[in-house]
Amino acid sequence: MSLPAPSAYRDFPGRRWLGVLLRAAHLAGVVGVGAGLLAGEGAAAGFVYLMVLSGVAMALLDAWSRRRWLRELAGLSLLVKFALLGWFVADEARRPLLFWLILVFSVIFAHAPASFRHRRLG
């Protein structure tokens, strides 16, 4: 008798609600950063930390749940967002433009069909 193949997806009770709470925190951080930029006050550090930490936590949860996620376009898009975020932090003059670029890029990847987001690289 052979054992069933291990699932490519890992889960735990409450993972879905944890993802929902992290996404809500992330969006609150994004709105706070955007509001500060639009008001001309710059991004408040608290909102930046909320946005980044919740985003990293969501990425870690996705990577843990689906190990192959990092080899998919969804995982690659995260690396691109981190590069853009680094540019955002380093280039104060371009922060408003970079904010919108990151926002639009993120929305496209978040709402693209799963067949696109989960396409494996290579």
Image: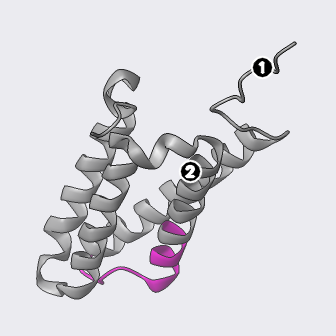
Q: Secondary structure at mark 2?
A: helix
Residue 38 percent across, percent down from the top left: 25, 69
Indicate the quadrant containing the N terminus: top left, top right, bottom left or bottom right: top right
The CA distance from mark 2 to mark 1 is: 22 Å
Q: Quadrant of residue 117?
A: top left
Q: Residue at x 18, y 67 (%)?
A: 98
The stretch drawn in magenta includes residue 46? yes
Depth check: give the residue in front, 96 or 1: 1
Going 19% across and 57% down the picture, which residue do you hit? 101
Looking at the image, is mark 2 or mark 1 nearer the viewer? Answer: 1
Left or right, 115 with reference to 2: left
Q: Nearer the viewer, residue 15 or 94?
A: 15
Can you name the residue that lies furthest to the top here? 1
Quarter of the image where the C terminus is located: top left
Give the image quarter of residue 33: bottom left
Compared with 50, 75 (above or below) is above
Q: In this orientation, which residue lies closer to the viewer: 31 or 25?
A: 25
The residue that label 1 is drawn on is 4
Q: Which residues are magenta?
A: 39-51
Q: Which mark is residue 118?
A: none
At x 77% / y 19%, what residue is drawn? 4
Three-letter amino acid code at the position of disc 1: Pro
Expressed as whole percent of the image width and height from the top left, the position of residue 92 reads: 19, 86
In this image, 89 relative to 57: left or right? left
Q: Residues within 10 Å of mark 2 (few under 14, many from 20)?
A: some
Q: Secondary structure at mark 1?
A: loop
Where does label 2 land, which residue?
A: 63
Picture residue at 38% right of the left edge, 38% below the top: 110
